[in-house]
Image: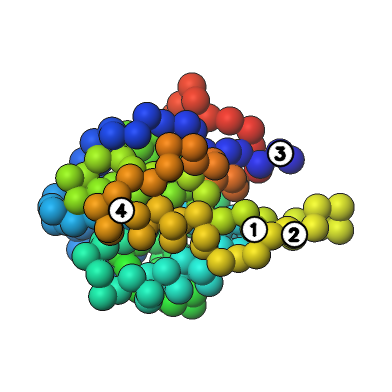
Amino acid sequence: MAATESKHLSLGLALPKFSLPDVRSRTLVSGSEYEGRPVLVIFLCAHCPYVVHVAPEIARVAKDYAQTSLAIVGITSNDIAAYPQDAPEPTAIFAESQGLTFPVLFDATQTVAHSFSASCTPDFYIFDSAHRLAYHGQMDDSRPTRGPDRPGQGTLDGASLRDALNRVLDGQKPPADQKTSIGCSIKWLPGNEPVFAGSKA
């Protein structure tokens, strides 16, 4: 089935409010905790082949930027009745196995996914130190192999995301022409699918 692209959003939008439990510690994590710091928010899930493909580079990004002011938060929002592998416990195992050292939060009601206009996994958002959207786009040009008729492509190096992160950390604005992320659609609860949601994958 066709993949889903992230939704085009206006740069400068405010970081949506959130307070969600971490799948590992179960403690609540709120966006307000990162006041004055740039924030990278990643919508992800354990089962999506696109997320599995980029997870090693996400882990490298977290390690490489650990000594900067950047905060990183993952959010998983899928319907766990339909996709139990994306429930908090399997997601915690996935995060540990992939070396994801940042909080990964569970959005059970999908309210936070709606507030971000999230469409797919992975979906990357960078907010500057004033918590205004500076980047919403792909990690890089690489794509996973999804069968013999859909071979992988590109180099998994995080080039697009790293360039945007470096600019934001230097107090600059990333280029306004940003390539959308692509991946599996968020698996919405019955009747909860937003009007912007695209193709299923």
Give the residue at mark 4.
Answer: 168
Give the residue at mark 2.
Answer: 152
Q: Nearer the viewer, mark 2 or mark 3?
A: 2
Q: Position of residue 113 (x, y in %)?
A: 38, 40
Who is closer to the viewer here, 69 or 187?
Answer: 69
Q: Nearer the viewer, mark 3 or mark 4?
A: 4
* Circle 2 SS class: loop
* Circle 1 SS class: loop
Query: Marks 3 and 2: in contact by CB < 8 Å?
Result: no
Residue ID at (43%, 49%): 124
Q: Position of residue 99 (x, y in %)?
A: 44, 77
Question: How far apart are labels 3 and 1 at the CA level?
Answer: 17 Å
Q: Nearer the viewer, mark 4 or mark 1?
A: 4
Q: Position of residue 71 (x, y in %)?
A: 26, 61
Q: Is residue 116 above or below residue 108?
A: above
Q: Nearer the viewer, mark 3 or mark 1?
A: 1
